[in-house]
Image (cartoon, helix red, strand yellow):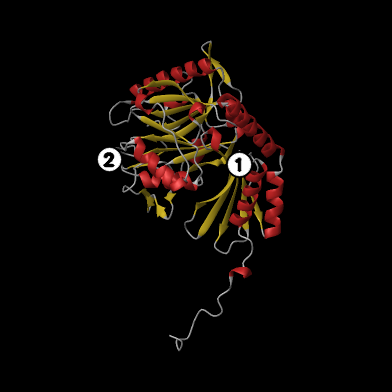
Amino acid sequence: MPVALFWNLNRRTLCEEVAQLCNAHEVDILVLAESHMPDVEIQRSLRRETETVYIAPFNELSSRIKFFFRYPPESVRQVADSYGVSIREIRPPVGMSLLLAGVHLSSKLYVDREEQSSQARLVTRMIEEAERSVGHERTLVIGDFNMNPFEGGLVDADSFHSVMAQSIAERKMRKVRQVERRYFYNPMWGKLGDGSQGPPGTYYYQGFKNRELFWNMFDQVLIRPELLPYYRKEALQVLTEVGDRQLLTGDRINGYFSEHLPIMIGLATE
Amino acid sequence: MSNIESFWGEIPTPTDFPDLPNKILKEQGSLLTDATDGSLIGEAALSDRHKQHFSAVLRIKVPSLNNYIYNIVKVEYPISIYPVTVIDLTGKDQNSVCKSVDELRQKLKQILGSDKVKSVITALLAQVSANAVLEA
């Protein structure tokens, strides 16, 4: 079962913490955003902690996303890279191939909602093009969308078109104004708020506007319907501890680490 | 020192301990390594040693595929060892709890002897031999 972990590191030096998480959760695919640490340093920590080799191919093509794979080099192929999105095809020695898109979309600090939605549309078109080029839709999108699951960029049919219910995603697509729009399933809906297992979100921000959410679920995974038979909800987690250390302090995220919490998903495709 | 009273009581010897999950996994790993003449390495590793609990994973490592790792099963156990939680990493099975060594052995037998694991071993050995032909 390949396990993918994503963490926006917030430019912190967290080599050891990342490696500990990879060891504790048997991570095969590590995806990092805002990582300013040299790849070789991360690889060294990974090797020391896990006693296995992680490769880091094609990272020079991407400024915002870094990938590390516990696969042979011939199992990973570069498909596309653009601002905020990097797409790789993974053909593991056992099991089926996957299309993996790592995303880190622009922050609300720098662009408005319309710009975010526009970027989401562009990234979705890139993913669709990648799916056509590899000839399947076993696609997993993971990363920091800088939008919540209920915002337009995630929900709109001409954007990610991600829905909260597997039963809807299983319909595969719907026509909107005569254009076929395929679904993603967004399991992060089930992680929102206190009613879910784990923290209420992955990112905490307390501002001074009239409307404040405090907890946000910016870090998400989206799954195409073709992968749903290999997904089970227990295999999706928002992580709150590294070894004995807590990533939360009280009801907030411990700023000593990143301002984001890591997320992890396993798919039984191998 | 001899006149200091020991508060520890009688300290148990290692023979009193039940078989550790990690030891059982290592034994099974070695059997796979031997049976495949080292083409596939059965490896048991402690993956987590924090918060007074342990996790041991049995995995297949394939040296000729750049040390590709395929995880088969994970056993999580507290410092008191049993009951342990067995997590089948090869499919969508739910976790199961084993209250004793015998139950653990039975569960591991079921997972390691499953069709899924057999097909994985077959696929890996096929690739190992294909690689050997290419390199020859």
Q: Position of residue A243 (x, y in %)?
A: 44, 53
Above-or-below relation of A69 to B48: above
Residue A121, located in which quarter of the rendered image? top left
Tell me which residue sits at (71%, 43%) in the image.
B113
Above-or-below relation of A169 to B53: above
| Amino acid type assigned to the residue bearing label 2 in the image | Phe
Residue A118, located in which quarter of the rendered image? top left
**Residue most toward the top?**
A178
Marked residue chain, label 2:
A
The quadrant of the rendering that contains the C terminus of chain A is top right
Within-10-Å neighbours for mark 2: few <14, some 14–19, many 20+: few
- Looking at the image, which is closer to me, A174 or A241? A241
Q: Can you see residue A213?
A: no
Q: Can you see residue B112?
A: yes
Q: How many marks?
A: 2
**Callout in the foreground (1, 2):** 1
**Residue most toward the front?**
B136
Q: Position of residue A55 (x, y in %)?
A: 44, 34
- Looking at the image, which is closer to me, B2 or B18? B2
Q: CA distance from mark 1 to mark 2?
A: 63 Å
Within-10-Å neighbours for mark 1: few <14, some 14–19, many 20+: some
Q: Element type at marker 2?
A: loop
Marked residue chain, label 1:
B
The mark found on residue B38 in the picture is 1
A259 displayed left or right of B43: left
The mark found on residue A208 in the picture is 2
Tell me which residue sits at (72%, 37%) in the image.
B115
- Looking at the image, which is closer to me, A90 or A111? A90
